[in-house]
Amino acid sequence: MESSSAVNALSALAQESRLAVFRTLVQAGAGGVAAGDLAQRLEVPANTLSFHLKILSQAGLVQGRQDGRFVFYSANYEAMNRLVGFLTENCCGGLVSCAPGSAVAAPESRRRRPA
């Protein structure tokens, strides 16, 4: 992922309502949620939700699909994983995993020696 794409995605998520929309869609799974149901769940007016979905869609984090009269929105998991990967690709200098529960030892030269 390029830095500019990461900035766009992070910028889209840097607003409380949009973050709530995205998290709800992530939890909903690949089937997504109808726009009207999403507005009800989050107690957001439809026009406000539409604005937030547009921003998230432009950032590539959500996608909509028409199904009859309804538009279902879902999280773009591939884009989400690319963003997380971008944020963690240089974690701990890229030498060891920084995942929770992994033991990260300091290099020999930085360890304190007993006095």
Image (tube, rainbow, N blue to C red):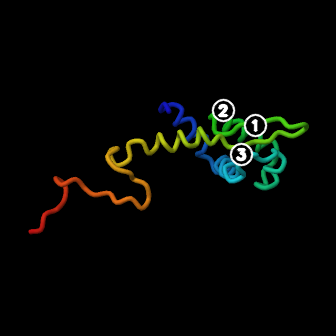
Earlier residue among tags 2 and 3:
3
Q: Is residue 100 above or below residue 36?
A: below
Earlier residue among tags 2 and 1:
2
Q: Is residue 10 above or below residue 2?
A: below
Q: Which residue is mark 1?
A: 64
Badge 1 marks a residue whose secondary structure is strand
Q: Determine the residue positioned at 68% across, 53% down.
A: 27
Q: Which residue is mark 2?
A: 58
The CA span between labels 3 and 1 is 11 Å
Earlier residue among tags 3 and 1:
3
Judged left or right of residue 104, residue 12 is right
Q: Which residue is mark 3?
A: 30
Local crowd size for mark 1, using a 10 Å CA cut-off: few (<14), some (14–19), many (≥20)? some
Farthest residue to the left: give it.
115
Q: Nearer the viewer, mark 3 or mark 1?
A: 3
Q: Nearer the viewer, mark 2 or mark 3?
A: 3
Judged left or right of residue 58, residue 49 is right
Local crowd size for mark 2, using a 10 Å CA cut-off: few (<14), some (14–19), many (≥20)? some
**Which percent across, then down, holds residue 112?**
16, 62
**Which percent across, then down, holds residue 32?**
75, 46
Q: Determine the residue positioned at 18% across, 55% down.
A: 108
| Along the line of sight, the residue nearer the viewer: 19 or 83 | 83
Q: Determine the residue positioned at 76% across, 37% down.
A: 64
